[in-house]
Amino acid sequence: MNRTHTKVLAVLAIVAVIASLVPLGAEGAKVATPLGKSLDGWKAKGPIENSKWAVGQAKVDPGNPRQLVVEPLDDGPAELATPTGHGDDIYTVEKFGDCTVELEVMVPKGSNSGIYLMGEYEVQVLDSFGKERVGPGDMGGLYGATAPSVNASKAPGEWQKYVIEFQAPKFVDGQKTDNAKFIKVTLNGQVIHENVVMQKQTPGGVSGKEAPTGPLMFQGNHGSVAYRNIKITLP
């Protein structure tokens, strides 16, 4: 075996080791992580500079448990937050169709927000901690459609994790042929929805119209809220 052949084998061995250390998603999957260290890549329903959203690190206001404070970003994960909740809805510049959305959300006491898939189909965000009976307007509800199967809410001020598997509506020649569907929604490790068909969009979205693709939107005009570790996986 000559020296060149030996070097080639050594390089291939190193590549194989590195590949074994990198987790692979589904074949051909694309992963979008829209939250960086600024509001680049995001739009608001009004001027972004007046939206009341900020990137930093959020925590419950020690003087007011119903609001958040946002401190400058350090070495931790970037967090997208509206401290007072009296701002605009905010959404990604990039648009998505079929996807799986993973994120964490923090809701202070009594607060209210919403995660809008494609900017039009809302998964409710609300302080529903401790409620024995929950409806479509509670944490994890598909607003205007169906209640979560269980109250999986954590206490206000704690980070909570959603995993949302979503199927976009389908269109042929501009006519809708299939409705949008929430294939599975998991909150804090508990399945709260499976195979819920959305007959129409939720009020309050970006355009108020159904389409093949749309952005990820967070409601910002109902209460203080923070989001982090946002990952959108496309097939």
Image (cartoon, rainbow, N blue to C red):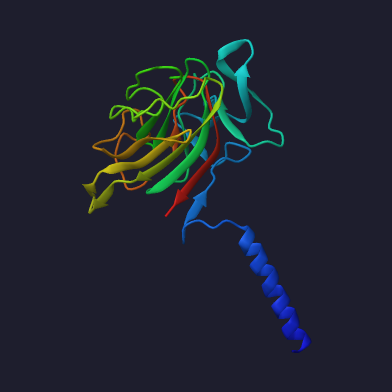
Q: Quadrant of residue 210?
A: top left
Q: Quadrant of residue 204?
A: top left
On the question of residue 27 being in view, the answer is: yes
- In the rendered image, the residue lying farthest to the bottom is 1
Along the line of sight, the residue nearer the viewer: 50 or 159 = 159
Expressed as whole percent of the image width and height from the top left, the position of residue 140 reads 40, 29
Q: Quadrant of the C terminus?
A: bottom left
Along the line of sight, the residue nearer the viewer: 39 or 166 = 166
Q: In the drawing, does residue 115 fall left or right of residue 105?
A: left
Residue at 32 percent across and 48 percent down: it is 212
Q: In the drawing, does residue 44 fall left or right of residue 12?
A: left
Expressed as whole percent of the image width and height from the top left, the position of residue 12 reads 67, 74
Above or below residue 27? Residue 65 is above
Above or below residue 4? Residue 206 is above
Q: Quadrant of residue 89?
A: top left
On the question of residue 215 being in view, the answer is: no
Q: In the drawing, does residue 75 fall left or right of residue 183?
A: right
Q: How many marks?
A: 0
Expressed as whole percent of the image width and height from the top left, the position of residue 106 reads 53, 26
Along the line of sight, the residue nearer the viewer: 223 or 101 = 101
- In the rendered image, the residue lying farthest to the right is 3
Expressed as whole percent of the image width and height from the top left, the position of residue 198 reads 27, 37
Residue at 25 percent across and 36 percent down: it is 200
Q: Quadrant of the N terminus?
A: bottom right
Above or below residue 211? Residue 39 is above
